[in-house]
Structures are given as structure tokens and as C-alpha cells.
Image (tube, helix red, strand yellow):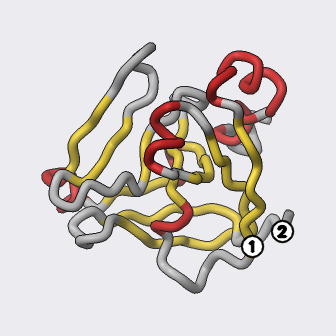
Amino acid sequence: MDSETAIHKGGCHCKRVRWQVRAPKSIVAWQCNCTNCSMRGNTHFIVPSQQFELDEDSKQFLTTYSFGTHTAKHIFCRICGITSFYIPRSNPDGIAVTFRCVEPGTLTHVEIMKFDGSDWEGSYSASGISACSKTDAET
């Protein structure tokens, strides 16, 4: 993967939720088959939380859904319903960004990896996904 980074901008469908994230131009995105991700068709890449910045005006349009262990925080726009980012169970210290919510032009390559959310514990251990929310200094 290319390690060159960019500032990617994006948000929800109605544009009330806006953010920017510093991440590589070439990313690994995770396609999960847990009950929530599979129903939403969400495919996301994960970054350390300090690399994600939510526009202050967007906060008023957000709502959160949580279930099961309540570690994951499924954050979505209360107007259009789009989950453009959320806090994943696999990386509660990071942000999962829905790659299709990134504005065109800054992502040069997306590699899709499978995460078996129906066997969450087994996939978590085998996938190495926990490293995605760590900074270079932490790895």
C-alpha cells in the first residue's frame, strides 16, 4: 500500500454532517458481515481518532445507536440516516470511515478486506484489524 497521506473530506448524503480525515491515499477498507454492517452494506477504513475531525456545526445532526457489547457507537445523520463514520467495536480508540462517503479525488486505491463479524472474536484475532487505529509511534 502507498503510505502517502492526504486530507480526505466527506460526510453524509444531505451534507449536514461534514468531516475531514488524514489517511493514506491508498487504503484498506473492511467489509464486515456482522448483523449491522451487512444490513447497511457498510465498508469502512479505520484511522486513529486524532486523525479525524468532525466539523463543529455537524454535531447537532448526529445520533448514535449501540447494541450488544455497546462498545461500537454507530453514529449517523438524524436527517438523512447515513453512517459516514462511527466508532467500531474492533477499534474503540479509532474511527471507522465509510469509504463511499469520502468526496472523490483523494483516494487513489481501495483494497477490500473481509472481516467475519459473524465470528467476531475469531476474525478480530486473525485479521490484525486492531492495529488500524494505532499511530506509527504506537506500533
Q: Tell me the distance, in whole angstroms, between the alpha carbons under discs 2 and 1.
A: 9 Å
| Amino acid on which the number 2 mark rests in the picture | Asp
Q: Quadrant of the N terminus?
A: bottom right
**In percent of the image, x 42 and y 70: which residue is there?**
10
Q: Earlier in the sequence, mark 2 or mark 1?
A: 2
The secondary structure type at the circle numbered 1 is strand
Mark 2 near mark 1, Cβ–Cβ under 8 Å? Answer: yes
Q: Assign a secondary structure to mark 2.
A: loop
Which residue is located at x 83 percent, y 26 percent? Answer: 126
Number of marks drawn: 2
Residue 20: x and y in percent read 44, 65
Question: In front here: 122 or 25?
Answer: 122
Q: Which residue is mark 2?
A: 2
Q: Which image quadrant for residue 91?
A: top right
Q: Give how far across and how far down residue 38 sits, in percent.
A: 53, 42
Q: Which residue is mark 1?
A: 109
Task: Determine the residue positioned at 72% across, 66% down.
Answer: 110
> What x and y, as percent, mark residue 103?
48, 78
Label 1 Cα neighbours within 10 Å, binned few <14 / some 14-19 / many ≥20: few
68 vs 117, left or right, is left
- Residue for point 75% across, 73% down: 109
Amino acid carrying mark 1 in the image = His
Crowd tier of the residue under label 2, counting other residues whose Cα lies within 10 Å: few below 14, some 14–19, many 20 or above: few
As drawn, 74 above or below 45: above
User: Which of 138/118 is in front?
Assistant: 118
Q: Quadrant of the C terminus?
A: top right
From the viewer's perspective, is the residue at label 2 or at label 1 nearer? 1
